[in-house]
Amino acid sequence: MIESLFLPPDVSGLIAALAIGLLIGLERGWNDRELPEGSRVAGLRTFTLTGLLGGVLGHLQPNFGPWPLVAAVLGLSLLLTVSYARTARLSGNLSATTTIAMLLTLVLGAYASHGNVTLALTAAVIVAVFLDLKPTLHGWLRLIEHRELTASLQLLVLSVVILPYLPNTGMGPFAALNPYQLWWAVILIAGLSLAGHFAMRLTGSERGILWTGLLGGLASSTAATVALARYTRQHPVMVSAAISGTLAACGIMFFRMVVLIGVIEPALLSTFGGAMMIAGILLLGMALWRQRQITSAENNDRTIEAMAPFDLGTAFSFAAFLAVMAVLVPAAKQWLGTSGIFVLSTISGLADVDAILVSLA
């Protein structure tokens, strides 16, 4: 980046610090462009000078240690606190975003001149992007329901808090129970379920039950089929549309299984991938054909709620079922041979194809 311009390190560091202040100041200045001159806490020039100040303080660190930067951060914090209190009292605006952005500009400017220039510039770009995304982020907050937030947090707990601490080794009967792999499979299924739910909400049910089946199949073709069946019980005129949606959900199921196989056991794709892709394409083709036969009366009523996001009960139930299958598959192979695996796969597949797929993989 800047180092590749063959400039002395001191000069490139100061240029990077100046660029950091200019970038963040440009975003903040544009955001407050309608405010009268002098009423802003900080604008383009102030941010640019703050970034340059951070760069100069970074150059002083080898000779004076971190204390000049510490003093500058404390002094700037005091100045910004006074300015923030005055602005909040006069305008009623309690947002501290600009204050935090100013402190980040000072620190990143120092890091650019006495640290990693590339990392400092990357962080500055991320800061500017997040500052600019305010309307989008606030719009998302207004759209997200509490159950969706809860489901997202549950998924993070499963994947970030618990997964890294699970042993990645086989244990139990036949050494078939690998806690790490079992938990990872649960996270994969739960993530697909949550993604399907959000996709349905973003697309909108007004586009028809066909989209409900397509997007519902991302989470669970069984759940999509049950939801469509319950809907047609209340709206019998939608039977043809529900058939189309069910075919679409089952078609997407095969593509979901291909993804699962690719993640868990890529070597099996050469054996099963082609057949599953063909089956999925045929079912989706049938769904589209059925959709073209739907009467206008059916097209006038397409409202159906998005599927609920997963809950911990569902995730733990899947984990328990998967653990049982993980033990039964090697047991059936040892006691009954290959025919035992076929019987076991047939029975378990009636309830959940994902579990038996993961177990056999």
Image (cartoon, rainbow, N blue to C red):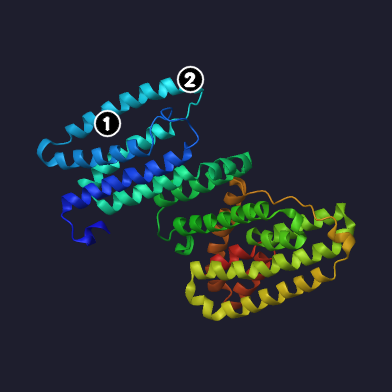
- The amino acid pointed to by label 2 is Leu
Check contact, mark 2 vs mark 1: CB within 8 A: no
- Work out whether 308 lies above or below 350: above
Q: First in sequence: mark 2 or mark 1?
A: 1
Q: Quadrant of the N terminus?
A: bottom left
- Work out whether 69 lies above or below 224: above
Disc assigned to residue 252: none
- Residue 91 place in picture, x, y as percent: 50, 23
Residue at image coords 73%, 75%: 285
Viewer-side residue, 17 vs 139: 17
Q: CA distance from mark 2 to mark 1?
A: 25 Å
Query: To which residue does mark 2 refer?
Result: 90
How many numbered badges does the structure rendering display? 2
Residue at image coords 63%, 49%: 309
Front disc: 2 or 1 = 2
Query: To which residue does mark 1 refer?
Result: 73
Element under disc 1: helix
- Residue 351 place in picture, x, y as percent: 68, 61
How crowded is the residue under tag 1: few (<14 C-alpha within 10 Å), some, or many (20+)? some
In terms of image quadrants, where is residue 68?
top left
Q: Is residue 258 left or right of residue 229?
A: left
- The amino acid pointed to by label 1 is Val
Residue 115 can be seen in this image: no
Residue at image coords 63%, 74%: 342
How crowded is the residue under tag 2: few (<14 C-alpha within 10 Å), some, or many (20+)? few
Element under disc 2: helix
Viewer-side residue, 96 vs 254: 96
Q: Is residue 187 left or right of residue 114?
A: right
- Residue 356 place in picture, x, y as percent: 59, 66
In terms of image quadrants, where is residue 226?
bottom right
